[in-house]
Amino acid sequence: MPAAGNKTIAQTWCQARGLLPAQTLEPGREVTLAFTGLAMPKDYGLLQQLGGRLETVVGMDSFMFWNPAWMGVLTRWLLRLLIWLNDLFKVSWGYGLAIIVITLAVKLLFWPLTHHHTNSMRRMQALQPQLKELREKYKEDPQKLYRKQAELFKENKVSQLGGCLPMLLQLPVFFALFVTFRGAIELRHASFLWSADLSMPDDVFGLPLRPLAILMGATMFLQQKMTPSTGDPQQQRMMNFMSIFFIFLFYGMPSGLTLYWTVSQILSIVQMLATNALNRRAEQRAAAA
């Protein structure tokens, strides 16, 4: 609540949810349902202690309309880690630092997969001239084109699914992080840098400028420019559009969630630079041998 004399108008919203046991209502039968109303912040830990599966109203167990069994397990552990790190730092920016540390830990955990994905994309990029020749040569025979492309990939040890698989394996963790930072009531009134409340968008001097969302879009655009390209102009236009789209998508998101995504993009750029440096050293050693 605003302090006495503070004229700031707080914007918030309320959510109601009913949890009812499944039952069959036969013709002519009446059923009386009793409800108990509870008005309180969506504190996952407190609601869980009250029982009755009240904690599900927080939305920690689902991503949009998808609620797999593993989602709640991951988000609960991530929430505990977020609170523990904040208590460990014991500073006013504790939750912001905790988000950065968790993002860094996830990036380090998936470093081998990301490294493999980047190298797979690089090998695919090197084959683009040969793939273009095959498309021109067999444009009237799609089946033969497919066979020739498969032979080329096998000869150069390139897997079309190999580049996608590492990213798909990371999606469960990314979804869980998204859900955790979106729904954690602990981020309410937690400040970081210019953001006074990590549960709200990051206004600057009361103006909806949202520098975190803009920075996220800029880093996303830079990362896409650094990523090995398949040479498809349409795909490049789509990726450029996604950078702009994500700015608008995150413009009204909680700044804690936008902070996670921005830091994740920055660390992806650092990973890509490190991968490129390792590849150059390997090429230099191979040339000198």
Image (spheres, helix red, strand yellow):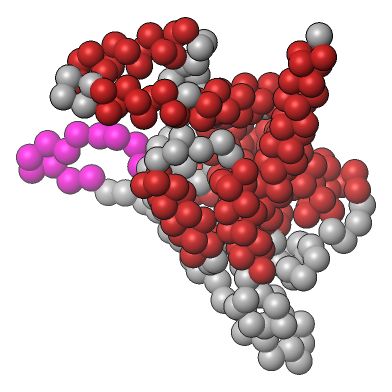
Asked if residue 173 is positioned above or below residue 269 in the image, the reply reads above
Residue 104 x %, y %: 76, 38
Which residue of the protein is positioned furthest toward the left in this rendering? 27
Instruction: Name the residue: 44% across, 56% down.
Output: 241
Specify the principal SS of the magenta part. loop
Instruction: Name the residue: 61% across, 24% down.
Output: 119
Residue 195 x %, y %: 73, 68
Residue 175 x %, y %: 54, 38
Asked if residue 7 is positioned above or below residue 67 in the image, the reply reads below
Name the foreground residue: 197 vs 107: 107
Range of the magenta residues? 20-31
Instruction: Name the residue: 25% across, 34% down.
Output: 23
Judge left or right: residue 18 versus residue 282. Answer: left
Q: Is any atom of residue 282 visible in this view?
A: no
Q: Is residue 29 magenta?
A: yes
The quarter of the rendered structure image containing the N terminus is: bottom right
Q: How many marks?
A: 0
Name the foreground residue: 134 vs 43: 134
Q: Is any atom of residue 11 visible in this view?
A: yes
Name the foreground residue: 211 vs 198: 211
